[in-house]
């Protein structure tokens, strides 16, 4: 009973250090955004539009780093405590099993689909539809921003890239989060369908009674023979030299030597 208890505690510890790490990352990202927004603010510009000081200077970065130093020290302490605990309380590694998708395929081949299994199939279809809608919305918002050339009219590359990241990254992140949630929901639904299939009726595996078609093998051999013949003909009539010349011209033009 000790090993399952250790596994459960290890999950709690891993979840805790993961949450603290994400919070630290959020604090660092917030500091970077504040530095950037302060650097492009009107207060940092002269009347002629020239910056009074650069956006990311060693002094500004050091000042912001000192502000979040306590959070970083706390994260290091928690990380070291987690490593020590994991060393003193080893967890038995799980043997990788068959993925849920393959297990479901094998299960469906041996059982007759019942109502519970059908409900899980419908659930996964709704999950997929919801994912497609979310991805379409995210893609549309990104395309709308990128298609507006007014967002790229400024010659200040830092400002243009910063604004693009502020408007694009949240939608891209939302798409990845939705994809991750969809994968987990579908995996859980597959396991539920596998459990529901345990009470389903069994069926004999279907036999492959399709007639043999030897002409398919003959056609494949003929295609290989024709390909080999055309290659030999191309080498004999000088086609290989022409291809080499074209390849050399393309390479030299790419690097600006042509």
Image (cartoon, rainbow, N blue to C red):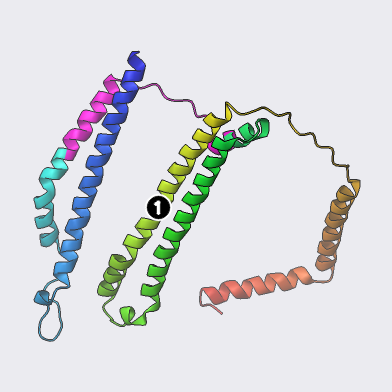
Quadrant (top left, top right, bottom left, bottom right) of the N terminus = top left
- Asked whether the viewer can see residue 52, the reply is no
Region in magenta: 75-103
Which residue is nearer to you in this view: 129 or 69?
129
> Is the magenta region chiefly helix, strand or loop?
helix
Residue 30 placement, left or right of 185:
left
Q: Which quadrant would residue 12 be assigned to in this image?
A: top left
Which residue is nearer to you in this view: 218 or 172?
172
Residue at which label 1 appears: 178
Q: Which quadrant would residue 15 be assigned to in this image?
A: top left
Tell me if residue 94 comes above or below residue 163 in the rendering.
Answer: above
Residue 141 image point, x, y percent: 38, 69
Which residue is nearer to you in this view: 192 or 60?
192
Residue 78 placement, left or right of 147:
left
Toward the top, the furthest residue is 1
Residue 124 image point, x, y percent: 51, 46
Residue 91 within the magenta-colored segment of the rendering: yes
Tell me if residue 105 comes above or below residue 25 in the rendering.
Answer: above
Which residue lies at the image location 20% right of the left edge and 29% below the top edge? 81
Which residue lies at the image location 58% right of the left edge and 71% below the top edge? 251
Residue 76 within the magenta-colored segment of the rendering: yes
Which residue lies at the image location 15% right of the left edge and 70% below the top edge? 39
- Asked whether the viewer can see residue 51, the reply is yes
Disc 1 crowd, CA 10 A, few/some/many (<14, 14-19, 20+): some
Tell me if residue 9 comes above or below residue 148 in the rendering.
Answer: above
Which residue is nearer to you in this view: 121 or 171?
121
């Amino acid at each position: 009973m000790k090993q399952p208890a250790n596994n459960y505690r290890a999950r709690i510890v891993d979840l805790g250090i993961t949450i603290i790490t994400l919070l630290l990352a959020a604090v660092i990202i917030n500091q970077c955004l504040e530095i950037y927004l302060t650097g492009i603010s009107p207060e940092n510009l002269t009347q002629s539009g020239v910056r009074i000081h650069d956006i990311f200077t060693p002094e500004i970065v050091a000042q912001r780093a000192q502000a979040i130093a306590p959070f970083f020290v706390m994260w290091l302490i928690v990380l070291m405590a987690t490593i020590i605990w994991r060393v003193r309380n080893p967890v038995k590694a799980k043997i990788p099993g068959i993925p849920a998708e393959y297990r479901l395929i094998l299960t469906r081949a041996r059982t007759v689909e019942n109502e519970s299994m059908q409900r899980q199939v419908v659930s996964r279809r709704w999950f997929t539809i919801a994912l497609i809608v979310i991805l379409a919305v995210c893609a549309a918002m990104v395309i709308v921003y990128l298609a507006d050339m007014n967002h790229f009219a400024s010659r200040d590359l830092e400002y243009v890239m910063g604004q693009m990241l502020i408007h694009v990254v949240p939608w891209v992140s939302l798409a990845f989060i939705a994809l991750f949630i969809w994968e987990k929901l579908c995996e859980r639904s597959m396991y539920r369908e596998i459990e529901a299939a345990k009470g389903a009726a069994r069926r004999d595996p279907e036999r492959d009674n399709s007639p043999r078609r030897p002409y398919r093998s003959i056609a494949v051999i003929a295609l290989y023979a024709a390909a080999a013949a055309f290659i030999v003909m191309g080498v004999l009539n000088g086609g290989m030299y022409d291809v080499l010349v074209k390849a050399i011209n393309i390479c030299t033009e790419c690097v600006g030597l042509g």
